[in-house]
Amino acid sequence: MPTMNMIRALNSALDVKLGQDPDTLIFGQDVGYFGGVFRVTDGLQKKHGLKRCFDAPISEGGIIATAIGMGAFGLRPIAEIQFADYILPALDQLVSEAARLRYRSNGEFWAPITVRSPYGGGIFGGQTHSQSPEAIFAHITGLKTVIPSNPYDAKGLLLAAIEDDDPVIVLEPKRLYNGPFDGRHDQTLETWAGVPEAEVPEGHYTVPLGKAAVVREGRQATVLAYGTMVHVAKAGIEESGVDAELLDLRSIVPLDIETIVASVTKTGRCVILHEASRFGGFGGELSALVQERCFWALKSPVQRVAGWDTPYPHAFEWDYFPGPGRLAAALRRAMED
Amino acid sequence: MANLPPLSLHIPEPSARPGEQSGVAAVQLPEPGETRRPDTLAVEADMRDLPFGLIRVLDDQGVAVGPWIPSVSPDLLRHGLRSMMLTRIFDDRLFRAHRQGKTSFYMKSTGEEAIGAAQSMVLGGGDMCFPTYRVMSWLHARGYPLTEMVNQVFSNEKDPLKGRQLPILYSARAYGFYSLSGNVGSRFGHAVGWAMASAYKGDDKIALAYIGEGTTAEGDFHEALTFASVYHAPCILCVTNNQWAISSYSGIAGGDETTFAAKAIAYGIPGLRVDGNDFLAVWAATEWAAERARSNKGATLIELYTYRAAGHSTSDDPTKYRPADEPEAWPLGDPIERLKQHLITLREWDEDRHAMLADELDQLVRVAVKEAEAVGTLGKSKPPVSEMFEGVFKEPDWRVIEQRRELGV
């Protein structure tokens, strides 16, 4: 089985799908001839033809609106928004249209669209190339939001998203495109070579939406994470010395509540880790769910480790970015309480 | 610098406010038959005068004149007349139903009935209309069941949209009528995407979308035009310029500076300006744009120049912001009266038949309202509450399942 970085794995998913289903097509800014600013669509136009993978105007609202119309016609469009930070002009289309079309038309129309977008920090992108907007989408009934943490899942989740009949946003942790990253920014860059999750089949497979992965089994605490933070969590758990169970949520809507509840019920402690700023972040929802469903099993308060409640700051990237040290400290606090 | 007067901010204002003489009658308009008709395959660069003309077919005597006279049989004209009359009678009856407390909200198409009626008759069954809430004559012309419509307005047990939508925000796929939303403009780009998909598939279907002149100020309008222009999307993009966006006159959307049809020039697509109260002109312009779209020549922007004769909605009183007699002063008249007059000049219609038809339609609407009332008006009857939880996703997730259980439905 070939080793793929996340870019190649995503490219492979798109390649497989374009090959299988003539009703799929890709469009977005710079995705055509050039192959995308992160190279995720590299070679797809050449291989599958101009009309299967083409450039779109710099108009996020227009891209999503057009995708919805294509979906209503019967296609399965895959739109790329170049950075998740740029998705906001399309918010009305996602919230008022994609998410609501099936419901308001009583199933006469629906929007089987996939919106891919690189998100997250750790690349010195400043506040316009680093944000994690997943909580905005999670709040919108009718949208699904998927966040892979490794190449194998990225391909399988993307294929599942494309085949899903509801609108799915796939947030791709751009810090993980070329290699795992545990938040230790002063260490040598790692690649995906030799990482088991970078063994990616060439052909078609899916990773179901709404199934968390137990990345590490443990008895003393549960860490909930997704995207880049899965790798940070691994390092943080190691650093803490706590025997923590690590769940990679993989999709936040649908959310694998059963696996979360089973784990926290077993361990009695829960720390939530995400890059997005804390207040109103998805960690708040996770914390509330854990409190509602695992209260009598909890031995200490649920803790959130997250980005600070500031815009994403350029010079202070590593002060802002929740690293393994902050998770380790939270785990130790959870054990003391 | 010293010689220049200080800057002053321009805030546009309409020609008249309540109590004043409306200026709409004084607007300079091209004569019927005056605006030329280029070949449907002509290049856009050679028709940049059209956005400043006005396609008019019917003259003041109801006679069809000029190069845009469409070939429409008397039977089809009578069907158009019937559809417009039905729309107005239905609207008046349902507006009263709102005043009687039978529903929460209603919006009338009064004065704009020619638009949806003519366009739905020109387009084919497989084409798709992306409507606004003021083109209900589209559905009436295609024979949408009246009782179902009233059931929707009443949000009762037989509401085809299961009580999930505000009255008149219909969805009727089988009638080529896309799901409406209360957010204005947000489906304009869907029409372009839909049309692009049709072209992608090598199909022969086209899309038609509406947006109000006020909403042309939204990004959605410009985004859709950009995509339509770039990808030559086979669609007809219509601005219904009915002069008023709630209380804001068309100048607040830039209508004093240029025509809405002229917005097309910047996108390199044809812009037609059409008398929206002239059934034949709407028919002819739509046919022209449809033929062009089906010939792979891409999109056309059509400004349908009309007048919103009634209030914005049941929540609006237009006498608060415009002269009360302005609707009567509108120089392009009433689309129903004008088509009626035309049919009479053709000796295909007369006053007696018109009165009989009005009675017949009134009766149809009465029966439909009665049938819907028998099911129940708003609050007296509603779909099962379980319907609230259906259709959020194709398959419900645990949140919906648990919450439905929590509510006990």
Image (cartoon, rainbow, N blue to C red):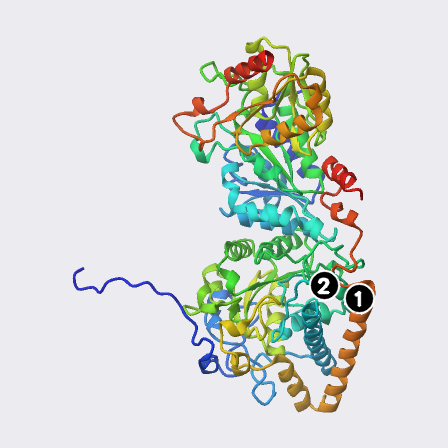
Name the spot of residue A141 as percent of width and height, x first.
Answer: 66, 42
Nearer the observer, B186 or A273? A273
Q: CA distance from mark 1 to mark 2?
A: 9 Å
Q: Earlier in the sequence, mark 1 or mark 2?
A: 2
**Residue B153 tag number:** 2
Displayed quadrant of residue A204: top right
Q: Are marks 1 and 2 in contact (CB under 8 Å)?
A: yes
Nearer the observer, A60 or A35? A60
Name the spot of residue B91 as percent of width and height, x first.
Answer: 68, 72
What is the crowding at mark 2: few (fewer than 14 residues within 10 Å), some, or many (at least 20)? many
Asked whether residue A60 is in view, the answer is no
Q: Amino acid at mark 2?
A: Val
Q: Is residue A30 above or below residue B379?
A: above
As drawn, is B381 to the left or to the right of B100? right
Q: Residue at x 80, y 51 (%)?
A: B384
What is the crowding at mark 1: few (fewer than 14 residues within 10 Å), some, or many (at least 20)? many
As drawn, is B250 to the left or to the right of B125? left
Q: State the SS at label 1.
A: helix
Q: Amino acid at mark 1?
A: Ala
Name the spot of residue A182 as percent of width and height, x first.
Answer: 53, 18
Nearer the observer, B71 or A146? A146
Q: Residue at x 54, y 46 (%)?
A: A90
Residue at the disc numbered 1: B372
